[in-house]
Image (cartoon, grey):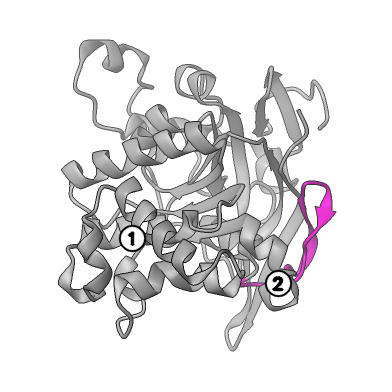
Amino acid sequence: MEPILEIKQLKKYFVTSRGTVRAVDVISFDLLPGETLGLVGESGSGKSTTAYTVIGIYAPTSGKILFRGRDISVPVAKRPKSLKRAIQIVFQDPGTSLNPRRTIGQILELPLKVHRIGTREERRRRVAELLRMVELPEDYIYKAPHMLGGGERQMVAIARALATEPELVILDEPTSALDVSIQAKIINMLIQFQKEMNLAYLFITHDLSLMRNVAHRVAIMYLGKICELAPAVEFFERPYHPYTKMLLSSIPVVSEEEEKVKPEKIVSKGEIPSPVNPPPGCRFHTRCMERNGICSEAVPEVVEVGEGHLVWCHLYGKKEER
């Protein structure tokens, strides 16, 4: 199966008065149709910058973004409408992503108007259908965003993203600002929509426990680079990178079975370095308990430690270059 999205040697730097911020610093991955790739990391790891570069909010500093084999490494303003229709995004905070001066009906109809989808009557039916899909009453078309709860606003944001029948949806921490019960409802909806529409999801999050049940594959980012990428089951059962082990060891568990596969508790030491002045060699070596001399000198190359399981770490011998 050919990837729907390919990221090749992507860089995104920002020039500031304090220096150049290396937000994303040479990363590569792909995404298949109907697949969920979880892009996970702490704040400042570069995961959201990656998402915004893919969607076209930022232009890449270098590298390529391919959608169905087509180079789309340009800002969104320069992308054709057909591409904008095929790639949509759901932001973390629906309170700021929904226009407070429009009704819910107008918000959901706008992408249909922009892409000239259907007649006026067909658009009205489509808006009603979208509300039913996210289990909201049809009379919500007359409400303003501030009249809805946070979970309901996020459901509207999801409905808006699905309005144009996209192929790829970028989910930028879509449930992190919501309470647990609403999170579960939205996650179940997203999984259902993916099955029904064969959607590909690039799921940005800091919540590894969520990825256990949602993602097909998981990629871990640290200070602008990917540390480890693996199928979800393999990732949780056999983590390799010390940073990955540290993150997994901090996940709360509720059963003895989960406790058995959880890595031994690893205490993080030190602070995350500044992306303006990242450490040489492996970005994680300043906090790593397993570092050795080469870690501070050379950037680790990718090693395939299992089928589809990639790790960027000097602790493992070079088996196969990607």
Rendered residue at 32%/28% (across/down): 265
Q: Relative to the observer, which residue lies in front, 250 or 35?
A: 35
Q: Position of residue 294 (x, y in %)?
A: 71, 39
Rendered residue at 71%/62% (across/down): 82
- Secondary structure found at label 1: helix
Q: Position of residue 311 (x, y in %)?
A: 65, 31
Residue type beneath disc 2: Ala
Rendered residue at 21%/73% (across/down): 143
- Residue 112 seen in this snapshot: yes
Residue 189 counted in the magenta span: no
In the orientation shown, which residue stands out farthest toward the bottom? 17
Task: Tell me, for residue 142, which label it has, or none.
Answer: none
- Secondary structure found at label 2: loop
Residue type beneath disc 1: Val
Task: Report the side of 79 relative to 84 (left or right).
Answer: right
Q: Which residue is mark 2?
A: 59
Task: Report the side of 252 relative to 248 (left or right).
Answer: left
Above/below status of 192 relative to 17: above
Q: Position of residue 253 (x, y in %)?
A: 24, 25
The CA span between labels 1 and 2 is: 28 Å
Of the image marks 1 and 2, the number of the one nearer the N terminus: 2
Mark 1 surroundings: few (<14), some (14-19) or many (≥20) residues within 10 A: many
Rendered residue at 29%/17% (across/down): 258
- Residue 267 seen in this snapshot: no
Q: How many marks?
A: 2
User: What range is drawn magenta here?
Assistant: 57-75
